[in-house]
Amino acid sequence: MSWTPFWFDGAFWVGAVSSPRVWVEILALYSDKGSVRYLMNARNNPSSRLAMPSFGFDHFHQGPVRLGEWALKHGMDLSSPHR
């Protein structure tokens, strides 16, 4: 799977998601919330000044793009990170 790095800002993880391996670590941290389904609904921060897209659940992350749709547009199936 090709990978496009992105920033994730959540309660259990804040930082760059630079590889599928990092994504798997994040999934484990959010397993009690339904992992993939929950995380796919994270919204972008349209005001972010980071060099990569930023997704999260706080009041800064209220943009129109959800992580799941963004990932699919970039050829990343986050529901199957091991591929």
Image (cartoon, rainbow, N blue to C red):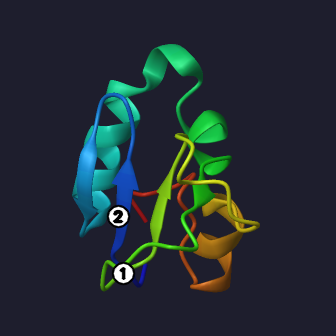
77 shown above or below 53: above
Mark closer to the chain start, 1 or 2? 2
Q: Which mark is residue 52?
A: 1
x and y percent of residue 47 in the render? 51, 73
The residue singled out by tag 2 in the image is: 7
Compared to residue 36, the image places residue 34 above or below, namely above
Identity of the residue furthest to the right in this view: 64
Picture residue at 32% right of the left edge, 45% below the top: 24
- Disc tally is 2
Which residue is at the front of the view, 41 or 21?
41
Q: Position of residue 25 (x, y in %)?
A: 26, 40
Q: Residues within 10 Å of mark 2 (few under 14, many from 20)?
A: many
Q: Is residue 29 left or right of residue 36?
A: left
> Dots 1 and 2: beta carbons under 8 Å?
yes
User: Residue at coordinates 53% horizontally, 58% vertically from top-left?
Assistant: 78
Residue type for callout 2: Trp
Q: Can you say which quadrant of the picture contains the N terminus?
A: bottom left
| Relative to 39, residue 66 above or below | below
Label disc, if present, on residue 81 of the rendered structure: none
